[in-house]
Amino acid sequence: MNTFSKPLACIALCAGIFAAGCKKEPLNNLSNEETRIYVTQVDSSARFQGYKTFSIADSADIIEDNQFLGRQLGPYESGLIAQLSQSLQQRGYTLVPKASNPDLAVNVSEVSNTSTGLFSYSDYWDNYGLYYDPYYWGYPGYGYYPPTFIGSYSIESGGLEVDILDLKNAAANGNKLKLLWSGLVRGEDIFNPANAPAEAKALLEQSSYIKATN
Amino acid sequence: MKKEKLTSCLSMLAMASALIFFSSDAQAQHSAEFNAGYMVNIPAGAFRDQVNQAAFRGFTAGVAYPVNEQLSIGLQLAHNDYYQKYPRQQYTLDQGTTVSAVLTNSIQQLPVMAALTYSLYKKGVVLPYIGAGAGVNFISFDQYLGEFDNPQSAIKPVFQTDAGVLIPLSKYAGTAIRVGGSYQWAPFHQLGTASLNSWGLMASFRFRLR
């Protein structure tokens, strides 16, 4: 047994050293741009050609741990909203004030969760959407269709969320604002003003179905 | 018929016992051997869908006990780190979900195997050998979308065949350089792959333990 005990100890030591030290760490080999992911989800029943006008929030909602903390308009938010607005107009939609009964509402949120786990849009809207957004968009007392979207990744920090809501059919939908599309950006350095246009473009570029005409 | 079978089995058992007895006698003249070396692994088969680049962060180490001058048995382990980063692209998931991300696969395998090595010649400047092993594979598979990890781990069976040459450096001390290649079967049914099979190239140093 003694003959084997030393070499086995050597092997175990080698294994420990190599296993711990000889791994190429993926996170150390990503630039900030590469850390970012863009996730878009669309309601399968949504037909974006049925809408002509849209209005976009004039600032971003700040949500922390499912609590609405207020609205914010800084250089980042301005750049993002401007690019989203421009991209949607290029897709054939007309920008109108929110008081002019737009067909679509575009909401921008900066969400940060300190907990980990699956990102459930249902949880988010259950806690947040039921008391704030309907008022902002001029639909007091309206509820939401609780979305069934669930992100299949873990979340440990903040992210940007852009939502497109159906205002046109709110009454027909049983006095509920239906979430048609949601875009999420996560990763490093998201809220850098220099990155805002690229983030807005990326979300819409992977959603080519959002257009007013076929 | 049954009696003949029984006799045949007993004969084989006796022969095996005799073989082990005489081998044991030979064992007294040999002590255990330790080997350690560097290893490069090249993904094969379905594994190439996840990583198609060679892994240069590998090592192998083991201890073997000579049964006789040509045959040795022992315990062998290896470690290798596979890594590949794919440029940003869009992935369409179910329920109308699209993800744009840089995808990185980071895979570590630590096979621990009972190994059998047979040298084709008893003596020579270069001694060709063949070998086989079977054991368990400790697998860690991290698939990153951007900076977000989807970690998977598993303990699976693993099998290996290998061949190469031993170049003795000393007639009496038992030190030798071992150079060879191997093929490893490593089933793994997670993250859209069926296996983590690989080819291996290895160079190691062997010395005898007193």
Image (spheres, rainbow, N blue to C red):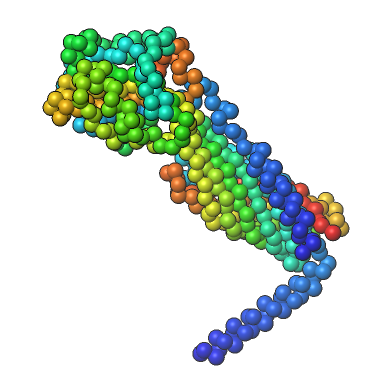
Q: Is residue B143 above or below residue A176?
A: below
Image location (x, y in percent) of residue B156: 53, 54
Q: Is residue B83 above or below residue A208?
A: below
Quadrant in which the N terminus of chain A is drawn: bottom right
Q: Nearer the viewer, residue B207 or B143?
A: B143
Residue drawn at (50%, 41%) of the image: B151
Q: Nearer the viewer, residue B48 or B36?
A: B36
- Is A115 placed left or right of B56 in the picture? left
- Is A169 placed left or right of B117 in the picture? left
Instruction: Count how many numbered circles sit on residues in the image.
Output: 0
Residue drawn at (65%, 52%) of the image: B77
Residue drawn at (81%, 64%) of the image: B30
Image location (x, y in percent) of residue B59: 67, 45
Q: Nearer the viewer, residue A214 or A126?
A: A126
Image location (x, y in percent) of residue B29: 83, 67
Q: Quadrant of residue B5?
A: bottom right
Q: Quadrant of residue A86?
A: top left
Q: Is residue B15 above or below residue B182?
A: below
Q: Quadrant of residue B134?
A: bottom right
Quadrant in which the C terminus of chain A is drawn: top left
Res B20 visible: yes
Q: Nearer the viewer, residue A187 or B105?
A: A187
- Is A87 placed left or right of B4 in the picture? left
Image location (x, y in percent) of residue A88: 27, 14
